[in-house]
Image (cartoon, rainbow, N blue to C red):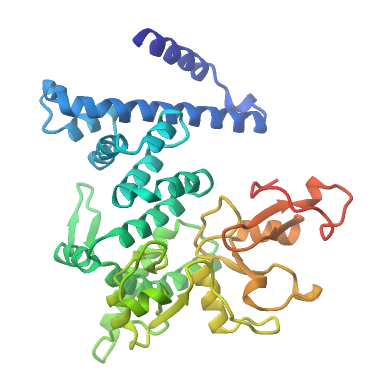
Amino acid sequence: MFEVINQAKAAIKDVVATLDPDTLDGAFASELVEEFAAIERLAAAGKTLCVQRVAKSGAWRRDGDRSPARWMARTTGTSVGHALGVLETAEGVGELPATETALRSGELSQVQAQEIVSAAAASPASEPELLAAAKTESVWELKGRCAKIKAAASPDELDRYEAIRVRRRLRHFRDPDGAFHLDAVLTPDAGAVVVAALEPYTERVFHAARSQGRREPHAAYAADALVEMAEHTRACDDQPSRRTPGAMVHVVVDHGALTRGSVVDGESCEVPGIGPIPVATARAWATDAYLSALLTDGTDIKAVCHLGRTIPARLRTAIELRDRTCVAPGCDDARHLEIDHITAVTDGGPTRLDNLARLCRWHHYLKTHRGHRLSGGPGSWRFANYEQAHPGRSPDTAKETGSARPP
């Protein structure tokens, strides 16, 4: 076995040693990335399958490590947290034959396998759904799906919520360079309130930076916004209010779950971008003015309609909660999304839910200026470059084909 592995390793090493990316055609370089990713997935599968034996045999003790996770973190050059995830995946994947087969064949990355094993352990019947989702969804989307499944499968969501509440904390420290760090653990609903309060400040910092010609990561703007929010609170003469004006927390909950008081398989009660919350928490929030609750049937949001170009607040909220990321397949951009009329108003397209979708700035640009067209709907969106696929043909008559890949 080692002879084969060493030969493969030597061959890959030779390829990488002679690789000159500046001489590669862009399309060829893209194919190479895909091949290296496939090799990476197979290597991750091998590590995952072998590490369980290392843990059980006690071989990790030979170099004085305190735990299998610390041994793996040191051996692989990763964090202890990442190593723990691999160990948990290795322990659970044996109970999920289909997932193990997909892992061994290189169809799943380690992160995908970890999420599926964690969710399928709580709800074994969800394994086929999750394996299918892993083929088309981003890791971010897959994690969200797994979180919903685990929340619905929990025997007592309030017990799980209480366990998080007991662990809540906020601490700060300075690193050796003198930088100030904040570390917090909050319940999902408390986290949602913090994020909602911070968002208006983050937007203001973002626009101020752009007006000055500065471009920095969103995390940097959020850090500035936190300081600005604290300074604003100190400057207030009156008692600080519980929430910043303009802050809004949105909750998406199935009507049946809200009526029943708990979620079952296929239902959800969550704060978009944060995660599942207990139905009881959503009910308790119902009388608070900062909450926007949207009832759904589990598949789509219905019956919100308005004629004209201007998008009213109620319709905008529905779109934002339905389309939490850019709807172009494969894109999980969730920041600075723009609401697009699928059929333009100038072409007779109405301003109603089934003719609106959120796109990131890049995909909105492609649709507006580069001949791309959006079609389908929630769960079946399609985004294609009709001008490139059908040169000389009108985009209005071209067949709907293609993907979200930019030209």
Image quadrant occupied by the N terminus: top left
Q: Residue furthest front?
A: 125
Image quadrant occupied by the C terminus: top right
Tell me the residue at 31%/31% (across/down): 48
Query: Is residue 207 rendered to the left or right of residue 155?
Result: right
Tell me the residue at 49%/31% (across/down): 37
Taking depth in this image into account, of 269 and 86 the one nearest to the observer is 269
Query: Is residue 167 rendered to the left or right of residue 236?
Result: left
Residue 53 lies in quadrant: top left
Residue 250 in sight: no
Query: Is residue 119 rendered to the left or right of residue 36?
Result: left
Taking depth in this image into account, of 249 and 215 the one nearest to the observer is 249
| 124 in relation to 72, above or below | below
x and y, in percent, of residue 15 in the image = 52, 17
x and y, in percent, of residue 346 in the image = 79, 75
Residue 81 in sight: yes
Taking depth in this image into account, of 400 and 406 the one nearest to the observer is 400
Tell me the residue at 39%/14% (across/down): 5
